[in-house]
Image (tube, rainbow, N blue to C red):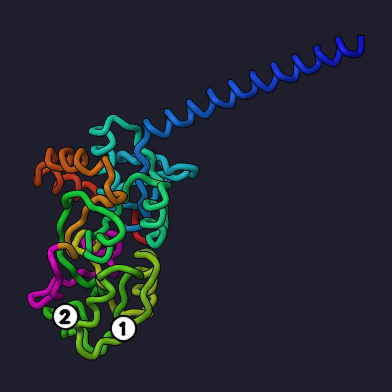
């Protein structure tokens, strides 16, 4: 009798383990399928008009993964078109600027669509698609201040100037003779606060962000130069970052090629119009 009970117990235990294993395999399979059906895009959601954070899905905002907030902007609209072309569900992963490349190389995200330039240094670590935007460098300053009328970057000699950390924007400040190069800052909202409070006299940016800043805050002005910074084509271009040898690259390029320059400019104009007010 004891042997029979032991045998029955052993058989029951084996059945439970087998069923649990099947359930785990099914869940694992479902999870893998869901992963394959998504296109995970990393961006800061803090670089208007390229990308920003908002509280609802207005103007095409996309829910941020694991967050109650939404992301909007030019990059988000481009990401939506790419995801649609790939036949995948877009997932926005809000990531600090410094964490974007590590997130891509570790597989946490599938692509970086974050106003990122395909610089030679970055190309050593990741690959890039064809360009999806090109812009010029400008300076954002206080409206009515001594630097609003600047025509040359050399007019900023003696000025307190900064730019975003780990960007080529910060390195070009060295082209200004006698400039007071302030420590780089983590993000654009921080630079706007520093400019508003007088901690800095200006920050280097790209034209869309300058238009965005001056449109959203009446105290800011954008300075465009007749004698500007010396940059390479890659420095002022913006492309999609992908992992080395990514299977996405070719298809992304095909999708981007189908977006006309007129449509790209319309998307940017709408992003500038729809951006949240500057803080």
Residue at point 23% right, 91% down? 178
Q: Earlier in the sequence, mark 1 or mark 2?
A: 2
Residue under label 2? 153
Give the residue drawn at x 38%, y 39%.
91
Q: CA distance from mark 1 to mark 2?
A: 13 Å
From the top left corner, tell me how far across and down residue 177 is, in percent.
20, 88
Q: What span is in magenta?
A: 210-233
- Which quadrant is home to the C terminus? bottom left
Q: Please provide percent x and percent y for residue 55.
A: 43, 45
Q: Residues within 10 Å of mark 2 (few under 14, many from 20)?
A: many
The quadrant of the image that shows the N terminus is top right
Res 204 seen here: yes
179 relative to 223, above or below: below
Badge 1 element: strand
- Asked if one can make out residue 142 in the rendered structure from this viewpoint, the answer is no
Q: Nearer the viewer, residue 185 or 121?
A: 121
Q: Nearer the viewer, residue 219 or 125?
A: 125
- Residue depicted at x 78% and y 18%: 10
Query: Can you tell which quarter of the image residue 166 is in?
Result: bottom left
Label 1: how many Cα within 10 Å (few below 14, some 14–19, many 20+):
some
Of residues 92 and 126, the one nearer the viewer is 126
Disc 2 on helix, strand or loop? helix
Decide if residue 59 is on the left or right side of residue 211. Answer: right
Q: Which residue is mark 1?
A: 181
Residue 29, image x, y percentages: 48, 26
């Amino acid at each position: 009798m004891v042997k029979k009970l032991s045998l029955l117990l052993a058989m029951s235990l084996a059945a439970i383990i087998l069923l649990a294993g099947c359930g785990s395999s099914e869940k694992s399979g479902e999870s893998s399928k869901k992963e394959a059906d998504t296109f995970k895009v990393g961006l800061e959601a803090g670089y208007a008009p390229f990308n920003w954070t908002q509280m609802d899905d207005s103007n095409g905002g996309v829910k941020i993964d694991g967050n109650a907030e939404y992301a909007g902007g030019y990059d988000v609209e481009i990401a939506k078109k790419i995801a649609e072309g790939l036949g995948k569900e877009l997932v926005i992963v809000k990531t600090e600027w410094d964490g974007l490349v590590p997130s891509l190389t570790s597989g946490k995200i599938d692509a970086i669509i974050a106003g990122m330039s395909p610089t030679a240094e970055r190309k050593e670590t990741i690959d890039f698609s064809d360009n999806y935007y090109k812009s010029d460098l400008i300076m954002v300053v206080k409206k009515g201040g001594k630097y609003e009328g600047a025509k040359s970057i050399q007019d900023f000699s003696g000025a307190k100037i900064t730019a975003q950390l780990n960007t080529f924007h910060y390195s070009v400040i060295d082209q200004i003779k006698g400039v007071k190069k302030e420590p780089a800052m983590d993000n654009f909202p921080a630079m706007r606060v520093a400019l508003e409070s007088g901690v800095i006299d200006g920050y280097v940016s790209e034209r869309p962000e300058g238009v965005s800043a001056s449109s959203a805050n009446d105290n800011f002005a954008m300075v465009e130069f007749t004698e500007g910074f010396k940059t390479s084509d890659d420095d002022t271009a913006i492309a999609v970052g992908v992992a080395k040898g990514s299977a996405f690259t070719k298809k992304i390029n095909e999708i981007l090629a189908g977006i006309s320059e007129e449509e790209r400019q319309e998307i940017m104009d709408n992003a500038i119009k729809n951006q949240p007010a500057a803080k």
